[in-house]
Amino acid sequence: MPILQLRGVCKSYEQAGVRLPVLNDIDLSIEEGEFVALIGFSGSGKTTLLSILSGLIAPDAGEVILRGITRVAQVAGAGEGAPVDPGRDFRHDDPGVHAVAL
């Protein structure tokens, strides 16, 4: 079982009244002990992806799953006003989780 998964993650931002898609339908699976490097051009969504993985921001759509438990689930189209508590996403309420390095 993967330690961390993304399923169908999407994120966009609004700038000057225009919606700018940053991440579109991202699927990612990271196994325990696996090393992953995130590379890309400036503005390609690296920081946004890491912010979603770490629970700092919520995706507009999709799921973030840590050790088989869905920590964030957004309904497509729910947007920024959806009832999600990103602050609770990766708190260590599971005594078996000591650290997740991203």
Image (tube, rainbow, N blue to C red):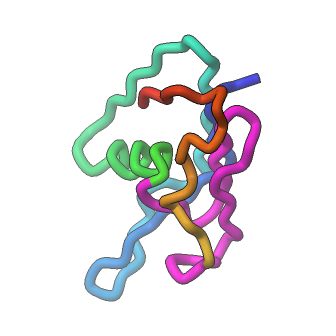
The residue furthest front is 95
What's drawn in magenta, residue-wise? 56-82
Q: Quadrant of residue 3?
A: top right
The residue furthest bottom is 17
Please check the rendered image and state whether residue 70 is part of the magenta-colored stretch, yes or no: yes
What residue appears at the point 54 percent right and 61 percent down from the top-left corner? 59
Q: Quadrant of residue 16?
A: bottom left
Up/down of 72 relative to 4, above or below: below
How many discs appear?
A: 0
Q: Please give left or right for residue 45 compared with residue 9 in the image.
A: left
What residue appears at the point 29 percent right and 78 percent down from the top-left corner? 15
Q: Quadrant of the N terminus?
A: top right
Q: Nearer the viewer, residue 79 or 43?
A: 79
What residue appears at the point 68 percent right and 46 percent down from the top-left corner? 7
What residue appears at the point 38 percent right and 29 percent down from the top-left corner? 38
Image location (x, y in percent) of residue 40: 32, 35
Q: Please give left or right for residue 59 compared with residue 8 in the image.
A: left
Up/down of 84 relative to 100, above or below: below
Please check the rendered image and state whether residue 99 is part of the magenta-colored stretch, yes or no: no
Q: Quadrant of the C terminus?
A: top left
Q: Quadrant of residue 33?
A: top right
Q: Nearer the viewer, residue 29 or 99?
A: 99
Q: Please give left or right for residue 30 compared with residue 54 in the image.
A: right
The residue furthest left is 42
Q: Nearer the viewer, residue 52 or 95?
A: 95
Image location (x, y in percent) of residue 54: 45, 45
Image location (x, y in percent) of residue 70: 72, 49
Q: Please give left or right for residue 12 compared with residue 17 in the image.
A: right
Image location (x, y in percent) of residue 66: 65, 38
